[in-house]
Amino acid sequence: MRWKVPSTVAESPRLPLLAGVIGVVGAVAAVLATTWSAAAAFAGILGGAGLAVAAMQRAAVAHRAELTRLGELVERRAEQVTALSHELRTPLSMIKGAADLLGEGSPGPLTPDQRRFITIVDQQCAQVIALCESLLTQAKIEAGLFTPRLEQLDVSVVARDVVIAMRALCAERKQRITLDTPQVTPRIQADPMLIVQALTNLLSNASRFTTAGGGIDVRVAVIDTGIAVYVTDDGAGMTRDQRRRLFQRFATGRPLADGTGLGLVITKTIVELHGGSIMVDTTSMHGTTFLFTLPG
């Protein structure tokens, strides 16, 4: 009688593999028990091994096909985010440009209330444009379409430029910001634009969660493995649950807080792209310190 293999067995790579292994083990056991001849046992071993190899090959083919499918999905998602980001950035940039002209008084003088509303429009446009950039960067990195442009970089110079750019925002919120760097900072291989983005994200996050009159301290240090950058604030800190969700998309440091949480996700991705790591030390009501390292 010829046995018919059920279709579910033929379609599943695991069951034939298991059957092949059992066949090999059974043949060996039969030889040890002297119930089979050596030739019969050898034939059983070959049959079982062949079945197992065939199953492994089918599993490998299925695995490669699944990886290809997932790669295409990720790439398609990145293309969709890129298109959406472009469609959003273009009109927003035009709105922001018009608001800047109005704020400068080019079309004519503004009343104090009008100037205040124009400032709000300008700030909100800048925030949404930054969000589009963050979404675009993250999508490209996830799709493997983003390659850092490495060059010799002085992290202390980058930190100084970012701190200078942040001073106006901190002054508006009545926050002080300080910078401490070594006298000589060894240059490292890094992408300047990405490091600027990572540090800007951390300072923006620190400013958002620091109350008026609070302080933010930035420190660059030389360590055995390269460069370490510390960003410390004396804000409200985080609870254990908030800390656990810290690097999740669209999860912010505290409930109902401003922001999307994308900034920290992208910062972590940028640091890891450079072969570094990022850590956080925080206690509720006692402030937060972010530390990221970059290899030398």
Image (spheres, rainbow, N blue to C red):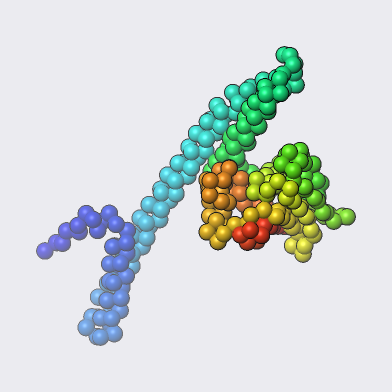
Residue at position x 58%, y 51% in the image: 253
144 or 172, nearer to the observer: 172
Q: Give the answer, above or below, for where 71 lies relative to 221.
A: above
Q: Please state, as top left, top right, bottom left or bottom right, where the C terminus lies in the image.
A: bottom right
Residue 110 image point, x, y percent: 72, 18
Q: Please state, as top left, top right, bottom left or bottom right, where the N terminus lies in the image.
A: bottom left
Residue at position x 57%, y 54% in the image: 246
**Quadrant of the image occupied by residue 291:** bottom right
138 or 264, nearer to the observer: 264
- Res 194 visible: no
| Extreme-right residue of the structure | 183
Residue at position x 32%, y 64% in the image: 17
In the picture provided, is 236 more to the left or to the right than 49?
right
Residue at position x 40%, y 56% in the image: 60
Count how many numbered circles sit on residues in the image.
Answer: 0
Residue 182 image point, x, y percent: 85, 56
In the picture provided, is 88 more to the left or to the right than 114?
left
Residue 212 image point, x, y percent: 70, 46
Residue 167 image point, x, y percent: 77, 41
- Res 252 visible: yes
